[in-house]
Image (cartoon, helix red, strand yellow):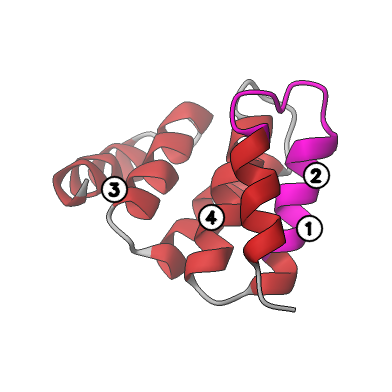
Amino acid sequence: YPQSAQAFRTIVRDYPDEIGYRFYFGVSLVGAKQFTEAIPPLKHCSTQENPYKVPALYYLGLANTGAGKFSEARIALNAYIDDPEGRAYRENARALLKDLPK
């Protein structure tokens, strides 16, 4: 994941309007455990209508959890669960919510 994050960093810099590149940049940062850095690109993807909006909510929840921002993680994960398209990781999101500190 670290190499992917570095590659996507360059791509996002060169193509800032490509939402898919931002999404995969954020996902690669989560995979590299660079949670705080993953939040801005994932937040950007989750607040606009685009094909990555719903999965970005899930990964934003993971990034916020890893960064210790538990209230923000709850908001993102609940939004993911509540969206009809949020099926792929719904059970994972529910389990993560259950285990989040209060």
C-alpha gap between disc 4 and disc 1: 11 Å
- For this rendering, which residue is in front, 47 or 86? 86
C-alpha gap between disc 3 and disc 4: 19 Å
Task: Name the side, left or right, on which 101 lies relative to 67.
Answer: right
Vertically, is 61 above or below 35? above
Q: Which residue is mark 4?
A: 62
> Which residue is at 62% across, 55% downward?
96
Q: Which residue is mark 2?
A: 79
> Mark 3 or mark 1, which has the lower sequence index?
3
**What amino acid is found at the position of numbered circle 1 in the picture?**
Ile
C-alpha gap between disc 3 and disc 1: 26 Å
> Is residue 65 something that shows in the picture?
yes
Q: Do residues under tags 2 and 1 come within 8 Å of each other at their CB atoms?
A: yes
Observer-side mark, 2 or 3, equals 2
Q: How many residues crowd around disc 2 within 10 Å: few (fewer than 14), some, or many (20 or more)?
A: some
Mark number, residue 75: 1
Stretch in magenta? 73-90
Considering the numbered disc 1 on the image, is that residue within a helix, a strand or a loop?
Answer: helix
C-alpha gap between disc 2 and disc 3: 27 Å
Observer-side mark, 3 or 4, equals 4
Q: Position of residue 33 (x, y in %)?
A: 33, 61
> Mark 3 or mark 4, which has the lower sequence index?
3
- For this rendering, which residue is in front, 48 or 86? 86
Q: How many residues crowd around disc 3 within 10 Å: few (fewer than 14), some, or many (20 or more)?
A: many
Q: Which residue is mark 3?
A: 9
Q: Position of residue 69 (x, y in %)?
A: 62, 74
Secondary structure mostly seen in the magenta stretch: helix
